[in-house]
Image (tube, rainbow, N blue to C red):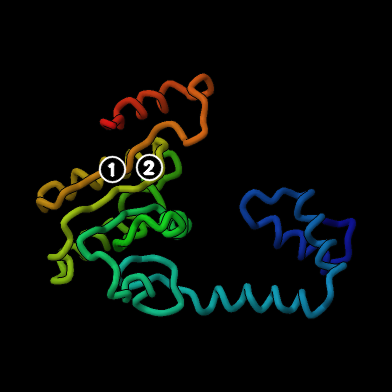
Amino acid sequence: MLYYPQPISDLIDGFMRLPGIGPKTAQRLAFHVLSMNEDDVIGIAKALVNAKRHLHYCSQCCNITDVDPCRICRDPSRNRQLLCVVQDAKDVVAMEKTREYTGLYHVLQGAISPIEGIGPDKIRITELLRRLQTPEAQEIKEIILATNPNIEGEATAMYISRLLKPTGIKITRIAHGLPVGGDLEYADEVTLSKALEGRREL
C-alpha cells in the first residue's frame, strides 16, 4: 500500500488478514475507521484485545468461554444424558437458538479435511474420547453428531461414529434434507436423497 501513509497502510493490511476481506473491502473499512469517533475506535480496539486475552476453551466441552467450565457445562438444568458434537462455537449458538436442545455439547473446533491438511489429530476428537472416559460421562445415553452436511462434516461424523461404536452409547446423526419453505425444483439430488432417507411417519 505505497499510496497511503504508513498508519493507513498498516490498518488496511490488518483488515486483509481477516477471512473474506479483500483489498477493496479492507480499504473501505480502514477509511470508515478514520471517519469514526475516537471513543468508538478505542472501544473496538479494547473489545478485540479483551476477546483475545480473556477467551479460552472450556476444559470440558472445548467451546469458547470466559469462565471454566463454561456456563452450559456448569448449568445443572441441562440434560446430561445427551451430548451434541458440533464443529464450532457458532453451531452451539445455532442449536441454542432453537430452544429445543437442552443437553450438553462437545465442540470439535473444525472438521476433518485432507485437502486442507486437517486430520483427526488437528481437531478436538482426542478430548472427546478422554471426556467419555470420565465418571460424569456415565450418564450419557446418546451422542448426536451435528457436523455440517458437507463432505468434511460427513467424513468427520463417520470417523467419530466408528470410534465411538465400541462404547455402546447410542450414536445418532442430525437429519438432513429440504429446508422449511424450500421448493423441490430447486433442491439438488443429494439434498433430495437425504430428505427421503430422513422421512418419518405422520
* Image depth: mark 1 or mark 2 in front: 1
Q: Which numbered marker is on residue 153?
A: 2
**Alpha-carbon neighbours of circle 2 within 10 Å: few (<14), some, or many (≥20)?**
many
The image quadrant where one finds the C terminus is top left
Say above or below: 11 vs 18.
below
- Identify the amino acid type marked 1: Arg
Q: Is residue 4 left or right of residue 77?
A: right
Q: For residue 43, what is the image quadrant? A: bottom right
Report x, y in % for residue 189. 43, 21
The image quadrant where one finds the N terminus is bottom right
Report x, y in % for residue 129. 21, 59
- Identify the amino acid type marked 2: Gly
Q: Mark 2: which secondary structure?
A: helix
How many numbered discs? 2
Residue drawn at x 70%, y 55% is 16
Residue drawn at x 30%, y 48% is 145
**Alpha-carbon neighbours of circle 1 within 10 Å: few (<14), some, or many (≥20)?**
some
- Quick check: marks 1 and 2 in contact, CB under 8 Å? no
Report x, y in % for residue 79. 25, 64
- Reading the image, the residue beneath label 1 is 173
Say above or below: 25 vs 31.
above
Say above or below: 134 vs 124.
below
Q: For residue 44, what is the image quadrant? A: bottom right
Q: CA distance from mark 1 to mark 2?
A: 11 Å
Q: Mark 1: which secondary structure?
A: strand
Residue drawn at x 24%, y 45% is 172
Residue drawn at x 38%, y 74% is 70
